[in-house]
Image (tube, rainbow, N blue to C red):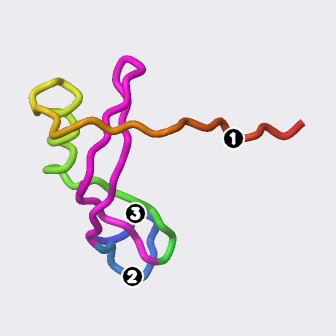
């Protein structure tokens, strides 16, 4: 896949962990396939990954476990 920013390198397929939110509830998806440009870092989601995210957020996929971690707020410049 070509980078939408016009970079000379083709985008690479990587597996990532992402957090999505629905109704202020976090949903963690591990091993999500994404395209990433090695030059600019731009990301694009393949259709099959987008469908998985949609199914998770709509409750059509059962979770495999629970994930919890401390939440930190970044310091705002004053």
Percent across and percent down for residue 5 are 46, 65
Q: Residue at x 65, y 36 (%)?
A: 73
- Where, by quadrant of the figure, is residue 26 drawn? top left
Q: Are marks 3 and 1 in contact (CB under 8 Å)?
A: no
- Where, by quadrant of the figure, is residue 46 drawn? bottom left
Magenta stretch bounds: 13-38
Neighbour class for label 1 at 10 Å: few (<14), some, many (≥20)?
Answer: few
Under circle 2, the secondary element is loop
Q: Is residue 26 magenta?
A: yes
In the displayed orientation, state which residue is furthest to the right: 78
Which residue is label 1 attached to? 74
Q: Residue at x 23, y 59 (%)?
A: 33
Which residue is label 3 attached to? 4
Percent across and percent down for residue 60 are 9, 28
- Where, by quadrant of the figure, is residue 63 drawn? top left
Which residue is label 2 attached to? 9
């Amino acid at each position: 896949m070509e980078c939408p920013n016009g970079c000379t390198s083709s985008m690479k397929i990587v597996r990532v962990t992402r957090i999505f939110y629905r109704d202020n509830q976090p949903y963690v998806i591990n091993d999500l396939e994404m395209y990433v440009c090695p030059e600019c870092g731009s990301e694009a989601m393949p259709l099959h990954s987008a469908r998985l995210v949609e199914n998770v957020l709509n409750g059509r996929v059962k979770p495999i476990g629970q994930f919890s971690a401390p939440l930190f707020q970044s310091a705002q410049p004053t």
